[in-house]
């Protein structure tokens, strides 16, 4: 399939009958890449303490949001090299990504690099399981015309579920570090939510099950550019 609809932190490769877990450790730096206007390349550093080394697969996808949800699509605008490598203990390895598209960046282009540890099943002991660890690293290419992001909020109750939606009207992403939502009765309907709201797109959060029936919501968010507070009335969806 050309589209990856979910960003998975961990993928477990085992049947439920296997009882114990064995995983290797891979360090990736940086954990976010933001390239200024005109920049076309960046480098990741990979490290491990494993004496045997860790096999790694790296892929890059175009990252967008549709219907308030994150989605990934294959891209040829940015390449990553090498796509497969082995990281040895005590010797850092590097991954290089390059934007090869000839058209200039308009606003901001957003990508995610998926870095997977490839478990060596031949080395597993009987009764153990291979844990494939996936690290998902956001990458942002800025254009010279990129305006700062700005969030507007709305809330909709649909099919007895209450959802808030943040829309970014600017041309740069906004990272929501923490998110708290209360209603007119001062009930806590969401605590600790987080996520990215990409440029010109929207991100949704579903509130707890007993949130239905709320009339007015107070939203308090901490973002990388400062606090964002809003009060919104709950609308009815179809």
Image (spheres, helix red, strand yellow):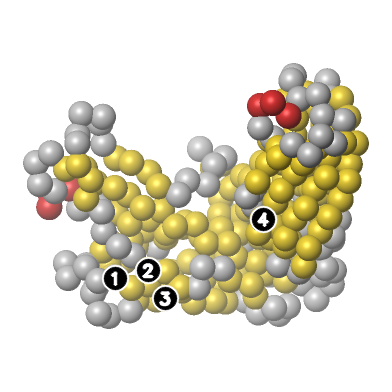
Q: Nearer the viewer, mark 3 or mark 2?
A: 2
Which numbered disc flags the more N-terminal residue, 4 or 2?
A: 2
- Residue 20, given in percent of the width and then of the height, sits at 19, 42
> Residue 45: which numbered mark, if any?
3
Q: Write down the residue under mark 2.
A: 27
For the point 50% across and 73% down, the residue is 30
Within-10-Å neighbours for mark 3: few <14, some 14–19, many 20+: few
- Crowding around mark 2 (Cα neighbors within 10 Å: few <14, some 14 to 19, many 20+) is some
Q: Secondary structure at mark 1?
A: loop
Secondary structure at numbered mark 2: strand
Hey, which residue is sitting farthest front in the picture?
185
Q: Residue at x 84, y 55 (%)?
A: 229
Label 1 neighbour load within 10 Å: few <14, some 14-19, many 20+: many
Relative image position of residue 73 (x, y in whole percent):
59, 47
Badge 1 is on which residue?
48
- Per the image, the residue denoted by label 4 is 178
Is residue 120 visible to us here? yes
Measure the C-alpha gap from mark 1 to mark 4.
Answer: 31 Å
Answer yes or no: do the residues labelled 1 and 2 have beta carbons within 8 Å? yes
């Amino acid at each position: 399939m050309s589209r990856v609809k979910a960003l998975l932190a961990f993928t477990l490769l085992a049947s439920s009958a296997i009882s114990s877990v064995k995983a290797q450790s891979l360090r990736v730096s940086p954990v976010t890449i933001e390239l200024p206007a005109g920049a076309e390349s960046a480098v990741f550093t990979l490290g491990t303490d494993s004496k045997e080394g860790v096999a790694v697969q790296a892929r890059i996808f175009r990252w967008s949001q549709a219907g308030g949800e994150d989605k990934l699509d294959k891209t040829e605008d940015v390449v990553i090299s090498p796509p497969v490598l082995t990281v040895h203990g005590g010797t850092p390895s590097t991954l290089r990504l390059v934007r090869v598209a000839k058209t200039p960046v308009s606003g901001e282009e957003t990508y995610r690099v998926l870095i997977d540890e490839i478990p060596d099943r031949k080395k597993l002991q009987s009764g153990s399981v291979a844990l494939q660890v996936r690290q998902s690293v956001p990458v942002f290419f800025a254009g010279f015309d990129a305006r700062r992001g700005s969030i507007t909020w709305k809330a909709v109750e649909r099919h007895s579920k209450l959802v808030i939606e943040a829309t970014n009207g600017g041309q740069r992403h906004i990272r929501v570090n923490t998110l708290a939502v209360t209603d007119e009765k001062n009930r806590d309907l969401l605590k600790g939510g987080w996520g990215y709201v990409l440029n010109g797109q929207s991100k949704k959060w579903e509130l707890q099950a007993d949130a239905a029936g709320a009339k007015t919501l107070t939203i308090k968010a901490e973002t990388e550019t400062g606090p964002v507070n809003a009060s919104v009335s709950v609308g009815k969806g179809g």
